[in-house]
Amino acid sequence: MLRAVSGVFAALLLTACGADRAEEAAAPADLSAWQGETRFHASGNPARLEDWGQFRIEDGRLILAEGVVPYGLNTALFSDYAVKLRTVWLPEGAEPASWDDREVFDFPVGTVITKTFYYPRATGGFERVSLDNDPHAHFDGRALDLSAVRVIETRILVRREDGWAAIPYAWNEDQASTRLARTGAFVDLTLIAAGGRSQALNYQVPDVNQCAQCHVTNAADAQVRPIGPRARHLNGDYPYAHGNANQLDHWREIGLLQGGPAAADAPRNAVWHGETTLAAAALEGAARAYIDINCAHCHSRTGHARTSGLYLEPSDPVGPSFGVCKPPIAAGRGTGNRLYSIVPGDAAASIFTFRMKTDRPDAMMPELGRSVSHQEGVALVAQWIDAMAGGC
């Protein structure tokens, strides 16, 4: 499960380090003044999130601008238990995104996708946050209640003439200002679980190169791309402000998407949001959906882990290339002294679950995007492996 890091990241690093630091040093602005138009920036890295006009702050709420559409994934990527508000916006007059059965939809130039990471607040201090990751507890389909959450960062993916660009913004503690974070940032938090159990968390806002390491899903062209907006991840209901609706149907209805079959006939991943008790019939679907969104963008025949021989896309059968009785190629200490990626019937002997569970930087998977283990995700995949028949 080792990710190969190509020379593209070295080149990106040099580019980022040589960029004009004036962008990042610009004084943060008060986000309550966001009243401008939603806009597409064809080049450059605006110094403030509000320069995009995707949101405004009013009466202590982060409100989506007109035409900015929230969305969710059937099973979401784990990011240190952060809750995510995802949105997509197309400029007026743009053609809708084009359907694809398997890959990310083909969005037009001018598309802006945002992902805002936040935690529900816990009592006892601003750095104390809750592990409750219900994405709709404080978001009503149009506005996020800032008095109830700690917002950490907003990442933007923008589709320009020469491809997608990733631009990260960190929020300041006043919850009313942001700053461009090309070189990333760290935020010290304390996660508070049910019953008061606490866990220290050094949350990392990724730099532009780390964004690329996950979002370059085809190493051959080294182009940044979105990961989530695919038919199988979006084919489910979403609680919009006007009521529940299937996302694929809604996107077509409002002109965000064109083409493709009816939702009932479209690809669909299982819906899993951390449930720890699953019926046997639902177990494989949930585990495969979790592995898909968390691992397959890298562990594919085009991703940066393509040389590992471990391929985890939904089209890949559960066999040797998926890790069953497969010895590692270059995992190093990441094996945890285990012999095979997946040992059917024995998750404890499997490299797969070891790397999901450990938080050692030289062994953990995914390599980026987390600093703590996703206990519920580990339990899900372990339960699936333990239910497999056979052995090695």
Image (spheres, rainbow, N blue to C red):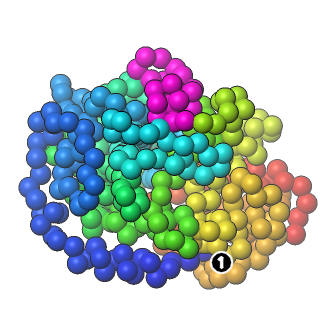
Residue 242 located within the stretch drawn in magenta: yes
Circle 1 SS class? helix
Range drawn in magenta: 237-258
Give the crowd class for mark 1: few <14, some 14-19, many >=20 residues within 10 Å.
Answer: some
- Who's the residue at 70% across and 81% down the image? 329
- Who's the residue at 64% across and 54% down the image? 291
Residue 339 located within the stretch drawn in magenta: no
Q: Is residue 387 left or right of 84 when viewed as pictured?
A: right
Q: State whether residue 134 is above or below residue 129.
A: above
Q: Quadrant of the N terminus?
A: bottom right
- Who's the residue at 12% across and 51% down the image? 28
Q: State whether residue 116 is above or below residue 182.
A: above
**Amino acid at dot 1:** Thr
Q: State whether residue 304 is above or below residue 224.
A: below
**Residue corresponding to mark 1:** 307
Q: Quadrant of the C terminus?
A: bottom right
- Who's the residue at 38% across and 62% down the image? 162
